[in-house]
Amino acid sequence: MAISRKDVARLAGVSEATVSRVLNNVGPMKEETKQRVLKAAAELGYVPNALAQQFARRRSGNIGVILPFVPKVRLFSNYYFSEILSGIGEAAKISGSDLLLIFREQEGERDYATLFRKQKIDSCVILGSTDIAEERAALTELAAEGFPFCLVNQYYEDEPFITVDADHASGARTAVRHLLERGYSKIAFMNGPPEYSNSTDRLAGYQEALFEAGLTIQNTHIFTGNYSRKSGYELADSLFSSIADGSVDAVFSANDRMAIGLQQRLKEHGLEAGEHYGLVGYDNSDSSRIINPSLTTVAVPFYEMGGLAVDRLMSLEEHQEGWDSQTARTLVPVELIVRETSEYPKQSNIRL
Amino acid sequence: MAISRKDVARLAGVSEATVSRVLNNVGPMKEETKQRVLKAAAELGYVPNALAQQFARRRSGNIGVILPFVPKVRLFSNYYFSEILSGIGEAAKISGSDLLLIFREQEGERDYATLFRKQKIDSCVILGSTDIAEERAALTELAAEGFPFCLVNQYYEDEPFITVDADHASGARTAVRHLLERGYSKIAFMNGPPEYSNSTDRLAGYQEALFEAGLTIQNTHIFTGNYSRKSGYELADSLFSSIADGSVDAVFSANDRMAIGLQQRLKEHGLEAGEHYGLVGYDNSDSSRIINPSLTTVAVPFYEMGGLAVDRLMSLEEHQEGWDSQTARTLVPVELIVRETSEYPKQSNIRL
DNA sequence: GTGAAAGCGCTAACAA
DNA sequence: TTGTTAGCGCTTTCAC
């Protein structure tokens, strides 16, 4: 049998209620009593029962972390989630919360609300959420019930859901401007699926940068992959002829993985990034540093974003801040990382 | 106020205990009663309170997942943990457990036992544990108290701790044999720190393979890094002259990250893997596929190991299996993945 | 400042 | 097959 509060109370010569007060440091108490209780607890090696506490307080103390289902590709092969998760972990520790990891099911079942109703979690951060009907419905339900949640790297234009997002429009603009400054002018864009708000944000940034430069936006220069290396690899075949015939001289990819797939495939075709065409990726993943030539990319502070999401959750629970569109979306800046794939060839041996 | 069991009981016209029985599907009950209760519960949208259940059952239903602190380098940049975590998630879902993520502190504080005493977790899987005094003490305490835990990718020679490990001795042997078969004969070994059992296992495998081939083991050919890319990069400088003067013709690295660091640095020195020297890494990480030339490596089924760890925990809790040295260690096989860095030069343009 | 006591919502003997 | 009831170990009014 474990030592209970009762034993501590007896040894300290106080009531059980006093033990609670001391341990939770709540209400008034005489310093001497406090010390006596603390001493008794330490002597007995008393450890409060978290289950009983949670039950009595009607709070689990858990932050749910909802991870997307990524078919085939193992979830965390993705650098992205690893960083965010670490950031969440750091902030959760500071706030004294525990993390309950929830792997979303493949289909349907976006029943986030039940996690709250069961009281398994007090709040949650949702990763990899997308703008599809079921997801919107699930989030709307959470909001309606007043369950605190925070999205990361995704927002909904017309809904004031709390979210920590990065400024991907600006990131894309900067990336494309960089290519333009380097001398490229026929820039294709390899985007991700439109149900991610960051895809549409990047598209806007891409278009703005071209517009600023007085260039016309060509729809035939816009391609859509699914953020996997494979999809970049496959799209490379469509882009090859355009690059070879000079109608495209650079590619901006919505993430590093697709950029790397493209880079690998074009190399098989005899085209080298930074030599025969310019290339900019997005995410500043480990791979972008490792690949050769190294990939110019846009760094997103995923780690920090994870931490911010937890912070928002905490302040949400304290005051009823943030549930309006003004403050719903926290936007963090991104940064261009210039490496080799965006070098502009000095000699005019650009064409094959 | 949420709907409680009492409301369901009233609507179904049964006692609260019967509601419990039906919902937990325990004990005998009339089919008709069961249906009535189920119907009432569905009608009211009743959701059992997990906190109350956990408290009454004196079980949290949580598996703790303990993650190592990795200074500076962000934890999950490591492909390794991502895979294991996904595997754990999959198995936990099947077993009906929740996952409580625990980021270990930097120093001291390996107080795993308190998590059990607080009843935050019923069992746990410990990642990234190493053979140092504090860790041994913490694990010994867990074992002494009978708290179920499972290590992954680490074992302790003289302790019958439950663990799911991969056969790294065999992996190293296979890797080195492969280099020998390819024609390399002066093989250096870049190992990780000895407090990881997989480091010492690989050393044994390396030595065995050389011994089998009738080669003498040269201590000057054995280097120790810390599994980071940086350490591989740095050790490359020591290896460069040996490769250049022909006293080393291949390197076996205890993980991909160090191998990649080495490969990058030696390239800066003008040496290309698979051309001027042979190279085999370990882990089959994403990066090993991306780097050019692609890295020959050893695949470890991390995902499966995570799942197996959970399975062991489950059977541990059911029967008192496994607490003897016979069955403590589950050993899974690894597999050599041959790529470009271990090609043996056809022409004799090996030397610079 | 401190104690007494009423729950929190469920499980699990034990009776019936 | 079902109902009654006594907890589970803590928090939190409300008195004193």
Image: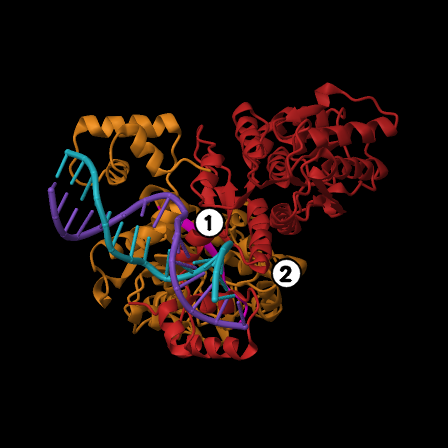
Chain colours: A red, B orange, C purple, D cyan
Q: Which residue is mark 1?
A: A58
The residue lying toward the viewer, choosing from A303 and B45, is B45
- The location of residue A70, given as percent across then percent down, is 49, 36
Q: Where residue B265 is drawn, which disc sits there? A: 2
Q: In this picture, is A303 found above or below A202?
A: below
Mark 2 — on which chain does it sit?
B
Q: Where residue B318 is drawn, which disc sits there? A: none
Point out the stretch of residues depicted in magenta: B97-107
Q: Is residue A156 left or right of residue B163?
A: right
Is any atom of residue B133 visible in this view? no
Q: Residue at x 45, y 28 (%)?
A: A108
Quadrant in which the N terminus of chain A is drawn: bottom left
Q: Is label 2 or label 1 in front?
A: 1
- The location of residue A61, given as percent across then percent down, is 50, 52
Specify the quadrant of the image occupied by residue B9: top left
The amino acid type found where label 1 is placed reads: Arg
The residue lying toward the viewer, choosing from A230 and A23, is A23
Q: Is residue A175 left or right of residue B324?
A: right
Is any atom of residue A24 visible in this view? yes
Q: Secondary structure at mark 1?
A: loop
Q: Secondary structure at mark 2?
A: helix
- The location of residue B189, given as percent across then percent down, is 47, 67
- The location of residue B339, given as percent across then percent down, is 48, 47
The amino acid type found where label 2 is placed reads: Arg
Specify few, some or many for label 1: CA neighbours under 10 Å numbering under 14, 14-19, or 20 or more. Answer: some
Q: CA distance from mark 2 to mark 1?
A: 57 Å
Q: Residue at x 51, y 41 (%)?
A: A67
Quadrant in which the C terminus of chain A is drawn: top right
Q: Is residue B177 left or right of residue A35?
A: left
Specify few, some or many for label 2: CA neighbours under 10 Å numbering under 14, 14-19, or 20 or more. Answer: many
